[in-house]
Image: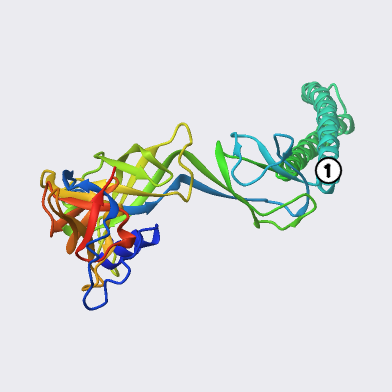
Amino acid sequence: MKTRKHFLATIFAVGLLVLSGCGRGKHEVNAAAEIPVQTAAVEEVAVDTSTHYSATIDPDTTVEMAFKVDGYVESLLKVGGRNVQVGDFVAKGAVLARVRQSDYQAGLDASRAQALQSAEGLKVAMWQLSQVEAMYTKASLDAERATALYQEKALTKPDYDAARAQLDSTHAQVEAARKNVEVQRNLLESAKAQERSSSITFEDTALVAPMSAVVLDKRVEPGTLVGRGAPAFRLGDVGTVRMAFGVPDTLVTRMAPGAVLPVNVDAFPDNSFEGRIREIAAAADPSTRLYRVEVAIPNAKQQLKAGMMGKVSVPGTQSAALLPAVPATALLRSPSDPNAAAVFVVEGGSAKTLARLRTIRHGQFAGSRVTVLAGLKKGERVVIGGKQNLVDGALIRVVE
């Protein structure tokens, strides 16, 4: 809410002419010279009782983008034939920048070669296992026959012992071959894991946009040496934007998630947007004693940009009131009260028309007019053009 002093300062800063000579003692009226002026009637306007809160537009989601690997930036995303810049829209999956891949290609090639070698080693180990398993099967059959013949006294003890020894030997070879297969399988899994890791590292040389967004910040150029984790881009999702503001406890009780509040943005004075309450703080900020309220505003056309200023209007409990209002161009600084305003009021009839300086108590802007809380009433006329030549009681001539 603007203070009265700030309000006046704003009016005079945009070109309202300050009353000249009003601070002097008595002013003499030159009755022989009528000063031409333009006037306007005091009209009543409906004054909105809503409370307006200023806030900044922020993206709905903001993501800091950083490389996972070290290296020199080799290239940037091209947008319209040039390198991507702040403010550009980028689609989900677009490669924003790429670190020099040759630094990581050798590691990827080595891991792939190791994986191929381990795969071949596993094949050899499995072939060897199949061979000794066949030998074990034959030795097992020979041992069974030798046992039967030995029991029938048809085989000598040395031949029987040789058959059993061959069975034990081939069994040991099978166990060794199986262990070798397990070792080779583990080596292959380790090599594949290393290959996947090298592949991921190689893929991490590309910085990929995780969502469709607008580039809010850019910190790299081709040739920049980047470190792991160093910020490179900041992206913002502006398909929906948000505004946050603080309200007192007397107002927060009348707000609810999902309620729609009108939003006006300084960059689009003729447009109004709908903000839907998405979040209401459960506790007040300890320093301000205000409750944070956040509204979400659909922005499919991306008219609203991050950083724009706007106002969120919270409806009041009373209906709009009718108050007198004058064009802002009628206001002067009051010579008697530096914190108040003044106007020249038209007095008299057709024979003699005078301009009388009157101090008023002003309210807020209502379009191009300013409401008057005291000092004027509907139907009176005030000077809006030519007032730089006037003093209190000056003889005037109204012109169109």
Residue 262 appears left or right of 136: left
User: Does the image show residue 202?
Assistant: yes
Instruction: Check the picture and name the quadrant holding the N terminus.
Output: bottom left
Res. 196 image quadrant: top right
22 or 202, which lies in front? 22
238 or 353, which lies in front? 353
Determine the residue positioned at 33% across, 59% down: 11
Tag 1, which secondary structure? helix
**Circle 1 is placed at which residue position?**
105
Q: Residue reaching furthest front?
A: 32
Instruction: Check the picture and name the quadrant holding the C terminus.
Output: top left
Residue 80 appears left or right of 150: left
- Amino acid on which disc 1 is placed: Gln
**x, y percentage for residue 374?**
12, 59
Residue 85 appears left or right of 306: right
Determine the residue positioned at 20% across, 48% down: 50
327 or 366, which lies in front? 327
Q: Residue reaching furthest bottom?
A: 25
**Vertical relation: 23 (above or below) 205:** below
Image mark count: 1
Colour style of the rendered protein structure: rainbow
**Vertical relation: 22 (above or below) 370:** below
Residue 254 appears left or right of 290: left
Determine the residue positioned at 24% across, 72% down: 335
Neighbourhood count class around disc 1 (C-alpha, 10 Å): few under 14, some 14–19, many 20 upward = some
**x, y percentage for residue 287?**
30, 70
**x, y percentage for residue 359?**
18, 65
